[in-house]
Image (spheres, rainbow, N blue to C red):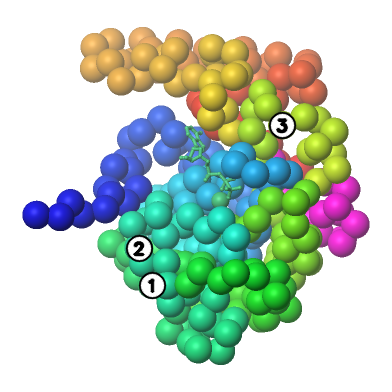
């Protein structure tokens, strides 16, 4: 018997510590954009493999499940698409087919087990993605979709190696920049911010992705022992105390210590 591919929807629970983090992130986006509704947000990073697709997927999931927002996630990374893998879906019949004129945008929308979460996968493999990538056309699709969805999240290639995100950024409402903690150089991030800014795009905030646990121990939820069923409230109290201490020290030294948040930290502009 063939094993069913595992989707992130299978193991996500709102009780998980990182789910809290995504709730906070959504709240921060909401606060800084005044209103999250009818927003199209581009998720990108300076370089490869900083966690864009992971953050994008969990953000979409949290918005749909916890905020009950009708959410559309579009995989616009035609070079290294991965949203279909996160959600265990077929890659084909997605954005490539829409851009090629083989499929209407509405026909490319795939449903998930979560009522409020829909996905447009990247589509079939193509040899020359830059030939097909059309920021104007994707912008039009996104604008059309904003009519039906509360939130449209677009996963994209990184900024430095290719021009796709820069071109697409100006067509959407805002950008979230994902940074791999402890690895991506400051100068590299600055260059990405310059490139995005040169197009008049608005960076809503950055997500510091602590995927290698390179931030100090107090950033890690495991330190709080949240999973222990014994003496939960004591740990929660301790976590709150540490969190407030850390935020205090962040305010004193924000450049050196970005805001501590489990293994994902977010900062809004
Ligand atoms: N916070 C995290 N903790 C643990 N693993 C993570 C975390 N974030 C990302 N990863 C893992 O790191 C790998 C790269 O992540 P992801 O695919 O999201 O990056 P990306 O920026 O979209 O990459 P690409 O530039 O190839 O599109 C994946 O295997 C993902 O599961
Ligand atoms: Mg990716």
Please identify the quarter of the rendering in which residue 208 is found.
top right
Within 10 Å of disc 1 (Cα), the crowding (few <14, some 14-19, many 20+) is: some
State the image coordinates of residue 201 (x, y, percent, origin top left): 81, 59
Labelled pair 1, 2 in contact (Cβ < 8 Å): yes
**Is disc 2 surrounded by few (<14), some (14 to 19) or many (20+) residues within 10 Å?**
some
- Tell me which residue sits at (35%, 19%) in the image: 226
**Residue under pointer 2:** 89
Residue for badge 1 = 110
Whichever of callouts 1 and 3 sits on the residue coming sooner in the sequence is 1
The answer to whether 213 is drawn above or below residue 178 in the figure is: above
**Quadrant of the frame with the N terminus:** bottom left
Q: Is mark 3 within 8 Å of ligand 1?
A: no
The CA distance from mark 1 to mark 3 is 34 Å
User: Tag count in the figure?
Assistant: 3
Question: Mark 1 or mark 3: which is in front?
Answer: 3
Question: Which mark sits nearer the N-terminus, 3 or 2?
Answer: 2
Q: Which residues are magenta?
A: 193-206
| Residue drawn at x 72%, y 60% as measured from the top left | 165
Q: Is residue 58 magenta?
A: no
Q: Which residue is mark 3?
A: 184
């Amino acid at each position: 018997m063939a094993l069913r591919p595992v989707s992130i929807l299978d193991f996500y629970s709102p009780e998980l510590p990182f789910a809290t983090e995504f709730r906070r992130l959504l709240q921060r986006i909401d606060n800084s954009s005044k209103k999250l509704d009818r927003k199209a947000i581009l998720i990108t990073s300076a370089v490869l493999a900083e966690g864009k697709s992971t953050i994008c997927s969990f953000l979409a999931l949290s918005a749909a499940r916890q905020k009950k927002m009708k959410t559309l996630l579009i995989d616009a990374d035609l070079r290294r698409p991965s949203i279909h893998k996160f959600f265990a879906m077929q890659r084909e019949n997605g954005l490539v087919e829409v851009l090629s004129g083989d499929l209407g945008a509405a026909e490319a929308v795939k449903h998930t087990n979560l009522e409020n979460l829909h996905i447009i996968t990247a589509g079939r493999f193509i040899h020359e993605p830059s030939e097909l990538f059309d920021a104007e056309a994707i912008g039009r699709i996104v604008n059309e979709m904003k009519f039906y969805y509360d939130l449209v999240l677009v996963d994209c290639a990184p900024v430095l190696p290719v021009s796709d995100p820069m071109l697409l950024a100006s067509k959407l409402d805002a950008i979230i920049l994902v940074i791999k903690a402890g690895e991506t150089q400051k100068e590299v991030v600055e260059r990405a911010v310059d490139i995005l800014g040169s197009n008049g795009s608005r960076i809503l905030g950055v997500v510091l992705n602590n995927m290698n646990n390179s931030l100090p121990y107090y950033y890690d939820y495991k330190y709080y022992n949240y999973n222990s069923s014994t003496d939960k409230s004591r740990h929660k109290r301790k976590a709150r105390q540490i969190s407030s201490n850390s935020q205090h020290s962040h305010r004193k030294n924000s450049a050196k210590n970005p805001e501590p948040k489990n293994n994902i930290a977010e900062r809004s502009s």
